[in-house]
Amino acid sequence: MTKHKSLTDYAARRFRFAGNALLEFSDPFFAQIDRLKADMEAAGKHFVSFANYDYLGLANHPEILAEAKRELDRLGVGALASRLVGGERSTHKPFEAEIAKFLGFEAALTLVSGYLANVTTISWLMGKRDAIFLDELAHNSIVAGAAGSVAETVKFRHNDLDHLDHLLARRRADFRHALVVVEGLYSMDGDTCDLPRLLELKEKHGFWLLLDEAHSLGVLGETGRGLPERQGVDPERIDLVIGTMSKTLASCGGYVCGKASVIKWLRYTLPGFVYSVGLSPVILASARTALRLMQEETWRIGKLVQNAELFRDSAHRAGLSTGPAIGRGVVPILFKDDVETMWASQHLLASGFYVPPIVQIGVPKDQPRLRFFISAKHTPEEIEGVIACIRDMPPVSEEARHIVATAMKGASRPHADESSEPETAPPRVKRRAESREARV
Ligand code: PMP
């Protein structure tokens, strides 16, 4: 009989492998930012977050708040059922039509989160003799969708389309259908993929293309329509686009866009849609207003570009590495090791800049970073201030290194049978899973 371990022992061990020892040094996670801001301001300090997705600075826009309140009074908070069997609100389909039209697609379907949109679409779409080709830095929701599918998962090196071409040449004939999933703007590195080249490969090998535009809406392209607009590609050539309302649209929920007949099929069958509640009417009203404002107040997109480029250029002038980031909504600053990253985050917080570290989980373990979400609302002083603060930070103290080194003793890789992936996951996915758990 295999040795039985209590769940608490097992959880403690797994948490150790996930890097909880670093919390002995400091725990910057789950900060109550409303309270933090209030406390800092009461102490006469300026507080600014670079950790929130509010790309166009719409989060507290008075028109969004007013619409949300109006809808709350009119329709209440909850959708109260799956739309298929419980009926929907008169606002669900108009929003879906608007987002589809804006992005250049025939139709769209909304779900309660962007994460769910990826998981359920990818796992539902692909069957037994099919394959899912993923960029190795794909967001966890994409990896989880592939892991939950019966199809085989094949990973290609990050943004290396020669590698994808090679893998497809070697393996495409083994499968009935193939799906390639890429992201418009990668959430940890802030770089983009080469869509025109990907479409050439699509012609050459024959696959369906799913583009995750979670971080691209309102961020890429002159009018914020995302990577296709930035790279001059007709969206019609992409099979599915997945997006979220939690970032530029400053609310919550996800959507899938595609051809009307495909979306109609998903509307009646997609498990994460059919067996889950519809979007709250309050959320819908907020997202719909944000989508309208984004098109009316076009200066916001230009301001975001200006800010993100200022951030990237200031970082470079200060001798900091921003990795492959193109200088749009997401720009990381890479550090030597975990301790230095935690140290930098702590130092920034003491100066009023909230930027939690991305260490151990979420990115490859040898590439810890502070990941900055730039907003149209940031001022040049805030951007230059945060860079100066990193440039001038004192070196990591010996005491901090000692605390972490002591705490990290005994934390080793988990045994193969303690991988975080479900048993159905193919080996390639399993190996990376632990480091992807917190890719957010
Ligand atoms: N895709 C990507 C690339 C993401 O970065 C995220 C979230 N950060 C999601 C999907 C999930 O979106 P949501 O948080 O709205 O569920």
Image: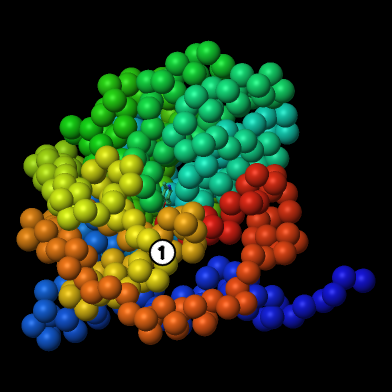
**Which of 185 and 222 lies nearest the eye of the viewer?**
185
In this rendering, the answer to whether 176 lies above or below 424 is above
The answer to which image quadrant residue 367 occupies is: bottom left
Q: Position of residue 96 (x, y in %)?
A: 36, 39
The answer to whether residue 365 of the structure is visible from this angle is yes
The quadrant of the image that shows the C terminus is: bottom left
Secondary structure type for disc 1: loop
Q: Residue furthest right?
A: 1
Q: Position of residue 182 (x, y in %)?
A: 46, 35
**Which of 65 and 181 lies nearest the eye of the viewer?**
181
In this rendering, the answer to whether 45 lies above or below 157 is below
**Which of 177 and 4 lies nearest the eye of the viewer?**
4
The answer to whether residue 148 of the structure is visible from this angle is no
Which residue position holds label 1? 337
Query: In the image, what residue occupies the spot 55% across and 35% down?
Result: 156
The quadrant of the image that shows the N terminus is: bottom right
In this rendering, the answer to whether 50 lies above or below 310 is below
Query: In the image, what residue occupies the spot 25% across and 37% down?
Result: 220
As shown in the figure, which amino acid type bears the numbered disc 1? Asp
Query: In the image, what residue occupies the spot 24% across and 61% down?
Result: 50
Q: Position of residue 77 (x, y in %)?
A: 36, 63
Quick one: label 1, few (<14), some, or many (20+) residues within 10 Å? some
Q: Position of residue 149 (x, y in %)?
A: 66, 42
**Which of 270 and 135 lies nearest the eye of the viewer?**
135
Image position of 236 (left or right of 378): right
Q: Give the total number of marks visible in the rendering.
A: 1
